[in-house]
Structures are given as C-alpha cells and as structure tokens.
Image (spheres, rainbow, N blue to C red):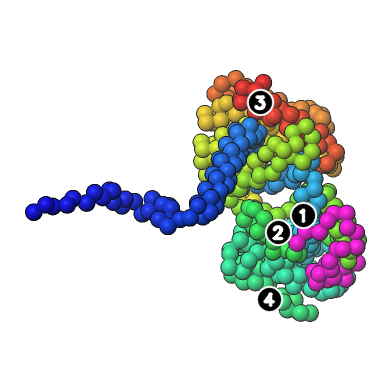
Amino acid sequence: MTIMLVSREPVDRDPLSAALRPPIDETEEEKAHRLADEEAAKRVSLAIDEAIKLEDKQRKKRRLVRLLLLGQSESGKSTTLRQFQRLYTPNAFREERILWRAVIQLNIVRSIHTILDALNDIRRRDVYPSSTYTSDPDSDSESENHVSLPYHLEELRRRLYPLHHVESLLIAKLVPPNEHEATTLGVGGSNSVNGNVPYYGNSYPPSSHAFRHQEVFVRPGAAWKLRTSGRPQSAGTTGQETIDESQTVLHHCCPDMIALWQDHVVRQILRRRKIRLEESPGFYLNDLNRVTSLTYFPSDDDVLRARLKTVGVSEYSFHMEAGPETGTEWRIIDVGGSRSQRPTWVPFFDDIPCIAIIFLAPISAFDQTLVEDRSINRLEDSVLLWKEVCSNKLLAKVDLVLFLNKCDILASKLKSGVRLAKYVRSFGDRPNEPEVVEKYFKSKFSAIHREHSPIPRKFYGFCTSVTDTTTTGGIIASVKDMVVREHLRASKLL
C-alpha cells in the first residue's frame, strides 16, 4: 500500500500577518489598487516620521527661559509678572484687561469698608483733636473717650450700605462656591467665607467683622478670569464695554464714596489709626469718578495696581510677542509670599532649573508689620528672607536680581515726616531723603549678597516702583537682556 504525503506550507499563526495577507482569489486589478494604497500609506507614514523629527529638532533649538519670583506677601511679585506680560505679550495683556474690572471693583469696595470699619469705635480726640478736656487720655471711661459719629458721616454710612451686597456679588464672581479660597484671616463668622455674606437691604449688618479681616484668595491660573465677565474683549473696541450690577451700584454710590474719602474728620481718624490706604495695593479712591463710570474700561495702569492675592505656586508660560527675542518661551514661576506658604519654595529650588531669581523687597514697609504676624517687622522679614535665599546652596549658580520695591511710597512716606532712623537705628543721622535711604538699603542688601553667597557672583540691584510703567519698563528690559545672556551662556551659545 502506497501512502501519499501531501506537502503543506507552514501554518502562519500570526493574526496580524493573516489579516494583511492578500486574498487568495485577488484579481490583477484588485492587486494594483492594493499596492497603490500601500504605497500611499507608506508615504504618509514617512511624512509623519519626518514631522516628528523636525519637531524634536525645533524643540531642542527652542529657547526656554525660566524666572522665579520671590518675596514676602504684597512685595509686588504679581505686579512684576503683569509688567512682563504688558511689555512682551501686549496683545494678550490688553485682551484680558476687561477681566480685571471685577477685581478693581472689589478693591474699591474693600477700601471703603476699611474706612467704615475705622468709624465704628471713635473717640473724642478723633473728632475733636483741638478740644481741651481734662480727662486722663488712658482712661477707659465710656463717657469721656467715646463719642457718637457725626451725623453727616452716619448718613454717608447709611447710604453706602449697598456696597456690602456688591462685595458679596464680587466674591461670588471671583471664587467658586465649592472652594474655600476666600479665607478669614482674623475674626469673623463662617458666613464670611466664600463670600456668603447676607444682604440686609437698608439696614446695617449686625456685625462688620465679616468684612474687616477677610481677604479674597484665588488659586493661580486663569480659572478666576473665566468666572468674571465672560470672554475678553478687544482693547481697542470702545463702546463694547459691558455694564454689570456691581458697576451700576458703584456709579450710584460714587458721590458718597468721594465725600467719605475727602472728609476731614475721616482723614483725622485714619491718620490717628495709622491707616494709610494710599500705600496699599488696589488703591483707587483718588480716581473714583473715572473707575465708577458706567463705561469704565481698565487701563494698563489700573491692571498693574489691582490687588488679588494668590495662594500656592504656579508657572506662567508665554511667548515673547515683541523685541528681538520674539518666539522665545518664558516661564515665570510666581510663588505665595506669606510665611505659611514659604515651605513650598524649596522643591522649586531643587527640581526646576531657572536662569535667575527676581527677589522683591518692599523697602517702604520699614514701619509696618506682617499681616500674618504682627510681631515681625516687614523690612526685617525681607532682610532675613534675602539672606536665606543668598545662602541657599541649591541656588549657588543662579543669578539673583534684587528689586528694592515701592520706592514711590518710600519717598512719599519720608516726605510726610516719617523718619527712617526711628525704625532702623543703624541709619543714624544720615539725611532722611529718598536717594540717601535707597543707597543705604542697596548697600546693606549688597553686603548680605556678597557675604552669604556660597560662591562669588555678580550683584544686580535696582530701586523700583513696579506699578510705574515708565521706569519699570526700562529696568525689566535690562533684566530681560541679562537673563537672555545668561541663558545663552548656559546653553553654550555665547
């Protein structure tokens, strides 16, 4: 018996190969179409590969500059960032100006409430400073020291009640209801958190504490901007400004707010309480007619002066739109400056390579204390913080740029008669003049930089007023050029 052996090809068990194998009954015409499709797919694949290689090559060539902004709370970090944006991404900056209107409105309301809070507990010497009465000034006698608020101020306070409702609306607009970003710094009930402040119509709220010790915090990024007045409008489109309820109420209350701010009794009380609103960020009481107009559109200066506190650490990325570095990507890391947030700085020192650090020290605050710790002088805190940054070994090769900030407020304060030597003994009997004081502070900070840097490095120090667009523009341009040079040197391109 003869056994016939049938020859078989090996079974292809690869499912992918089986799927790609041409059909057994494929005609010549179908084969031609298949080969043409495969050739087209191959060309597409090669094009994608080339695009990926080109993107990788461009990414390697792309210039990336990192800056870190450091300094205590209210030192001017956020304003410095806005100056960079105004100068080098002007289109984006102008497009977002309308979104700052709610912040400016809130700043105005907070300034008025600061004044009204100061009127809650007034004494005879506040209203009648030149009166002669023989009571002991340290006496706690209610009948001797406490007086009623003058009728015209009581009337102004009554007419300004609607501002409490406006404040509630603005906080709700800036802060989402499910996040505790508006926090209570001191006393105040839970109703003050997140802006859940009840509106009492024409009756005075049971307590003003809900408004006194609260500052609105927002998390870094653009989320709060999306919650404001909708999509940005073009900066050049006059007449497209929107009118909202808050602006309408502010416009209606404008004459009363001006009368309150300019009242001589109010000025006396603020002076005695050492409340200097003019030195605070977010001050607009000298521009009330303009900023409460129904067609008000924030200017560049208005945006730079606005106060909105951020919590946490964030990285702002943008590409230069102007100048020879057009297209260069800049990443500016803005960190919270309050004492409770400073531990978050350390990971950024270690993990993120940055070209330079801009450290802001508000030298006008030599007679002020920290909001979070009234026992610590703000100038002393800046000096200790500068010393800590200079001596940090992780930052040994990072250039440090010092902004001795708020020199405009310093000059105004010295001109009013406040003497630096009273608060800084080492200043001695030097002339109490802005130029002398700035030179003194610059030499002190320079000495700390020289003595505490792990390795020798160049000192870059500037006296600034970062809300001043004219002078700060030149300073930031100089800093930018220095940072770019260091970036090229670090990249071995210079």
* Mark closest to the chain's N terminus, 1 or 3: 1
User: Circle 1 sits in a helix, a strand or a loop, which is it?
Assistant: loop
- Classify 39 as above or below 110: above
- Whole-angstrom CA distance, mark 2 to mark 1, is 8 Å
Task: Say whether marks 3 and 2 touch (CB < 8 Å).
Answer: no
Residue highlighted by disc 3: 488
Residue highlighted by disc 4: 198
Q: Please check the rendered image and state whether residue 12 is part of the magenta-colored stretch, yes or no.
A: no
Task: Say whether marks 2 and 1 touch (CB < 8 Å).
Answer: yes
* Mark closest to the chain's N terminus, 4 or 1: 1
- Residue at 70% in and 59% down: 225
Q: Nearer the viewer, mark 4 or mark 3?
A: 3
Q: Position of residue 480 (x, y in %)?
A: 73, 32
Q: How many marks?
A: 4
Residue highlighted by disc 1: 96
- Whole-angstrom CA distance, mark 1 to mark 3, is 32 Å
Q: Nearer the viewer, residue 80 or 149?
A: 80
Amino acid at pointer 2? Lys
Amino acid at pointer 3? Leu
Q: Nearer the viewer, mark 1 or mark 3?
A: 3
Amino acid at pointer 4? Pro
Task: Say whether marks 1 and 3 touch (CB < 8 Å).
Answer: no
- Classify 321 as above or below 18: above
Task: Say whether marks 4 and 2 touch (CB < 8 Å).
Answer: no
Residue highlighted by disc 2: 225
Stretch in magenta: 231-260
* Mark closest to the chain's N terminus, 4 or 2: 4
